Each structure stands twice: as structure tokens, then as C-alpha cells.
Amino acid sequence: MSALLSLLTSMDWSSSRALQQLIDAIPDPIFVKDLQHRWIACNAGLCKLLGQPYEKVIGHSDPEYVTAEQAAEFWAHDDLVFRTGKPDDNEETHTIEGGQTRTIWTRKFPIKNAAGEVTGLCAIITDITEIKQRLGEAERIERENAAQRLTIAAQAALLDRMAVPVLQVWQGILLVPLVGEINARRAATALTNLLDAVVQHHAAFALLDLTGVLVFDGEVARYLARTVQATELLGCECVLVGIGPEIARTLVSLNIHIEGVATRGTLQGGLAYAKERLSR
């Protein structure tokens, strides 16, 4: 294509039929204009776009076949090439016969004489209507997917809050039963729920029941340590109950210190501890 453009911009178009067979073989509209914006050469693709025979295109110009607004836009880009002597490409709209509007990508290149003066331009038009439509459809689908992802995230957050309840089991005593696999997201939710409940219920003790925890990794262990620290800042003491061998090994291997934190083997033991402390 670059070789063809070089040929089109350098040849003498006084012979308007030169290379006609070659450019007619190209489906994209191709045309050459003089400084008065008149078509002095074109291929069959431009004739098809305009809905006019070759004889009614050569020597004519845009205002005869497109709206005044579109013609003004086309001419403005023509004049830019004429004035600067540099190529120009832009996206335009073109209303074809029957009122249908197409989106086109037009690339215009200056034609210069031996003295380097601009004597006209040649251009290639590519209809990108379908491409734009597909891009628009892809963007619409992406927006819908993004909205769906937000909905799923909101639902997941709600499920997490429901899956990590905070229960008031006694006046001033809260219970957080942790069950199943505790990942970082659920651990963070548990921390948020607990801190909110401590403030709401003016709780003095929070029982973190780890009896039903199946998977307990390092990240969750660190969340547990932060939970203990955060509740203490609110004046609430955490009691860890139901710590199994796996959890104990994880805490030790990560050097996570929980000195001073009350631990009990069962929920009943933890509740008894908290009630006894409250009665003092």
C-alpha cells in the first residue's frame, strides 16, 4: 500500500485514466483532488460510496453529494493538507444514498510538483462502521460485566458478613463463631464486624471461637493478632477458644505472640471466664 501511495502522490494526473485498472481493483475508495477540492481521479470504490457513475464524480466535489456540514468538514481537512503539505487522517461520518450514515477513516496525502509545491491530494477511505459497532458492543458488554462484578462483589461481601456473625451471648459478652475455611477476606470481615459490634454493644469481652476452623494460614493468623490488638484499643478483651493443633503450630511458626491473651479449650470455658471477670 505504501508503494501505491507513493505512486499516486508522484504521478501526473493530467492523464486521468492512468492506473485506473490498478486502483479499481482496490475496494476501499481512493480519490485525487485538485486545490479547488474537485475530484480529478478516483476508483470504482468512491463511485460506489457516492452512488454515482465515474462521469458524475470527476470534476465535481463534495457539496454535490453530501450534506453541507459534512462537505465543510471534508474541505477543512483538505485545506489542512494543502496548507501544511503534511498527511492527515481522521474519522468522519458520511451519509450515503438512502440517508444511512457510515463512519469512515480518511487518510489524505499531499501531491507536490517538482518544486515541492502542493498541487492537490490523494486519499484513501476505509469504512469502519462495523468495526465501531463491534467496539461499541464490546464496550457495552464490558460495562455490563463490570456492573455484574460489582453486584457479585456486593453479594460476596453480604455473604461474608452473614457467614461471620457476631452474637451477643451475654450482657457485655460477644461471640464470633469462625467456621470452615477462613481466608483473608473473611478474616477482614470478621474484624470489621467485631469492631462494629463492640462499639454498638459496649462489649467488655469477645469470644473468638476457632473450634470449627478448617484452614488457618499465615495471613489469617496475622488478622487474628490484629483483631486482638484492635479490640483491646476499644476496651474489649479477646478470649480465644477452641484453638486446635494446626492453629497453634501456625501461630508458633510465624512467631505471632499472643501473650496475655486468655485462651480456653471450649466455648463453655471461655464464656465462664468472661462471666467471672465481669462479676468482679
Image (cartoon, rainbow, N blue to C red):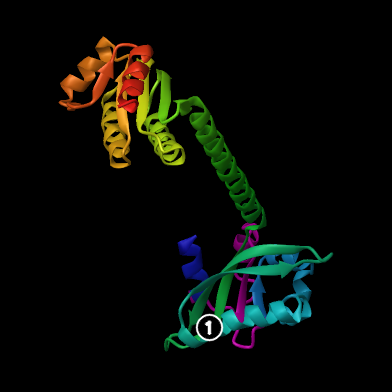
Residue 143: image x %, image y %?
59, 48
Q: Say which quarter of the image contains residue 175.
A: top left
Residue 4: image x %, image y %?
50, 64
Q: Quick one: 69 or 26, which is closer to the camera?
A: 69
Q: Quick one: 220 or 201, which is closer to the camera?
A: 201
Mark 1, secondary structure of its residue: helix
Quadrant where the C terminus is found in the figure: top left
Q: Which residue occupies 52% across, 81% down?
A: 81
Q: Quick one: 262 or 94, which is closer to the camera?
A: 262
Q: Say which quarter of the image contains residue 176.
A: top left
Q: Name the residue type under label 1.
A: Leu
Q: Count all numbered tags in the image, as a single digit.
A: 1
Q: Is residue 249 left or right of residue 38?
A: left
- Magenta residues, start to end: 10-38
Residue 268: image x %, image y %?
38, 12
- Residue identifier under label 1: 80
Is 190 located above or below residue 251 in the figure? below
Residue 200: image x %, image y %?
46, 40
Q: Which residue occupies 82% across, 66% down?
A: 99
Q: Quick one: 37 or 155, which is closer to the camera?
A: 155
Task: Answer whether residue 107 is magenta in the image.
Answer: no
Q: Is residue 21 visible?
A: yes
Is 179 located above or below residue 17 in the figure? above
Q: Is residue 14 visible?
A: no
